[in-house]
Amino acid sequence: MKNISNFTDGQKKKPSALIFLIIVLAGVTAGSFIRTGSSSALQFLNDFVPSRCGNTVYEVFINSFIRLSVFTVTAFVLGIWAFGQPFGVLMLVYRGLEIGSSTALIYSSRGLSGLPEVLVLVLPKALAVTAVSVLAVRELMRSSCGILKYVLSDCTESTGRGTFRLYCIKFAVLMIISLIISAGDAFMNYLFSSLR
């Protein structure tokens, strides 16, 4: 039991962001193949295609912020569950699938002429959203592992209100960053609307 609690100690051992990035990249690769294999399936994976994010600055901002918020809130909720870890991994795979599928859709419909759209409108947003997603899932893992450790150990002491408060503050910061990313996405779509 001691080995299990050492392994799941979310406070002392931070999950590596590199592992999470590899998971996202695996999802990107899979998303590219899904898109090239079928042009009509899985339309819900095209959230990064600029032309599907909205026609006005307001629509792009709202759509981007809602998608980021849903992801972040889901990670928050899963982080207060002892068995949320596998779902965190699935969330990162899904994020990668979105990026890969959206990029492949642009290339399949526009060919190499879609490269400027990908480089200017998709890639910066994908990098920023991936960073927020990785941070959210890392916090999910740390919290969920800490709760699992508490459940599996014979410890009866309280983890304290401060830990949960810090957890909430971290996710509040991620929501503010999501707001900034959404505003940046709307601005870039307005500035480079000719690329869409």
Image (cartoon, rainbow, N blue to C red):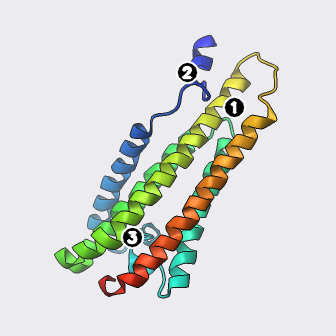
- Name the spot of residue 182 as percent of width and height, x first: 52, 70
Quarter the C terminus occupies: bottom left
At 28% from the left edge and 59% from the top edge, which residue is drawn? 33
Residue 38 seen in this snapshot: no
Q: Which residue is mark 3?
A: 41
Q: Nearer the viewer, residue 143 or 188?
A: 188
- Counting from the top left corner in percent of width and height, residue 101 is at 35, 65
Q: Nearer the viewer, residue 29 or 146?
A: 146
Disc 2 target residue: 7
Residue 76's disc number: none
C-alpha distance separating marks 2 and 3:
40 Å
Can residue 16 be seen at all in this image of the molecule? yes
Instruction: Look at the numbered disc 3 and give the secondary structure of its residue.
Output: loop
Specify which label sits upstream in the sequence, 2 or 1.
2
Asked whether, in this view, residue 66 is left or right of residue 166, the answer is: left
The answer to whether mark 2 and mark 3 are in CB contact below 8 A is no
Residue bearing the label numbered 1: 147
For the point 73% across and 35% down, the residue is 163
| Mark nearer the N terminus (1 vs 3) | 3
